[in-house]
Amino acid sequence: MTTPTISSNQFRSIVIYTTCGTALLSLPTTLANIVSQDAWWIPLVSLLLGFPYVLLIILFGRWFPNDTFVIMLTRLFGTWFGKIAGVLFLLLPFLSAPHHLHFFTQFIMTHFFRDTPSIILTASFMAVVTVAVYRDIEVIGRASELTMFIFIFSVLLFSVFVIQDVDTSYLKPMFQNEPRTYVETILFMNSRIVAVHMIILLVLFPRNIQDKRKAEHALISGYIIACLLLFMTVFLSITILGPELTKIQLYTGFKLGQRVEIAGIIERLESFLYVIFFITLFFKLAIYLYATSFSFANIIGIRNHEPLAIPFGILITVLSMTEFKSMIDDSDFYFLGSLYLIVPIVYVIPALMLITGIIKRARAHQPIVPKHPSGATTRNHHDL
């Protein structure tokens, strides 16, 4: 069976969309509530401190350039322990997807379709996502490349129109919180925004990218672009709305869009935020559903994972409507419940993978860091 592949440019788009996602709307409020006006520089520091984790993902990709993530786990830990770790990993995208889907539904109902039943919006959006995943990663990759121009154009146009209202006085005074607060905030962003998505992308990186060498550059550049976009979002929110107003605005981008007024002609550009948010969340949920169905197929030994997208898509839709009934439920999962998934899956499993891989490669007299992806051959995998 031929492995479906996407180009490095398409993969870069997927990295950007997956990393940004709902954070484009919610991150300014989240950070401002923790560190107030100092929220603007948190994404920049997180970009630097999260980079070693990106390099760790690249290292795993060089060790196993032609394997899925579940197969990586079984090669390192053995069949049974590897599949148990695979089940734990599967829970991360499967249980996180309903949270993001509910957040999207609330966003749409609040600003556009107030009288439309939530079940219609939730099911309709998830149906589109499910169809995309059913058609496999090649369709998702092409769609991501086609929509990237619209996404970048909307972001740039929105930024140009609101930047005139920037007031840097809102950034002062700086460093008024305890050092521990900043450390916790940076760890929160690295864990919830950076590491979660990097580990999920191992489902298709680098196995499903045509040029594995370029895939590494695409991962790095996509990560940097996504973090810079999040920085820009937080910076504009703090310097235009101020930290106090940012704290109480759940969808800060829409508040920024409502402030736009140029010569009485161009006003209220919040609709651009809808385009941006719709695109990013579509691909985020598509990758979550793809990771869930594809990993489950690997665990139970099914080659064709596409049909599994339908039942998992239905389950995610049902969980979104039954387990997340308000924004309070969203917040509880985001700040508390998800940590029980993040700590073992994002930190413990990769750490064990790194230690086990180093030991096995050292015993097999193989380089710990292969020079390039093609250096890790099928023979090397079996030696591990």
Image: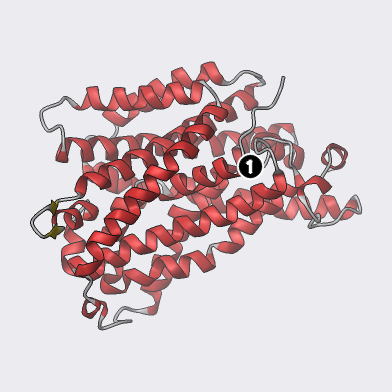
In this view, the residue in front, 252 or 357, is 252
User: What residue type is disc 1 on?
Assistant: Phe
What's the coloring here? secondary structure
Residue 287 rendering spot, x and y as whole percentages: 49, 36
Q: Which residue is at 44% across, 45% downward?
A: 17
> Element type at marker 1?
loop
Is 320 displayed left or right of 350 in the figure?
left
Residue farthest left in this picture: 264
Q: Can you give x and y, in whole percent of width and height, for residue 6 in the image?
A: 61, 35
How far across and how far down the image is residue 315, in percent? 39, 23
Classify residue 57 as left or right of residue 113.
right
Of residues 267 and 301, the one drawn nearer to the viewer in this rendering: 267
Q: Residue at x 42, y 44 (%)?
A: 149
- Residue 368, above or below 200: below
Residue 153 at least partly seen: yes
Image quarter in which the N terminus is found:
top right
* Residue 322 appears in the figure: no
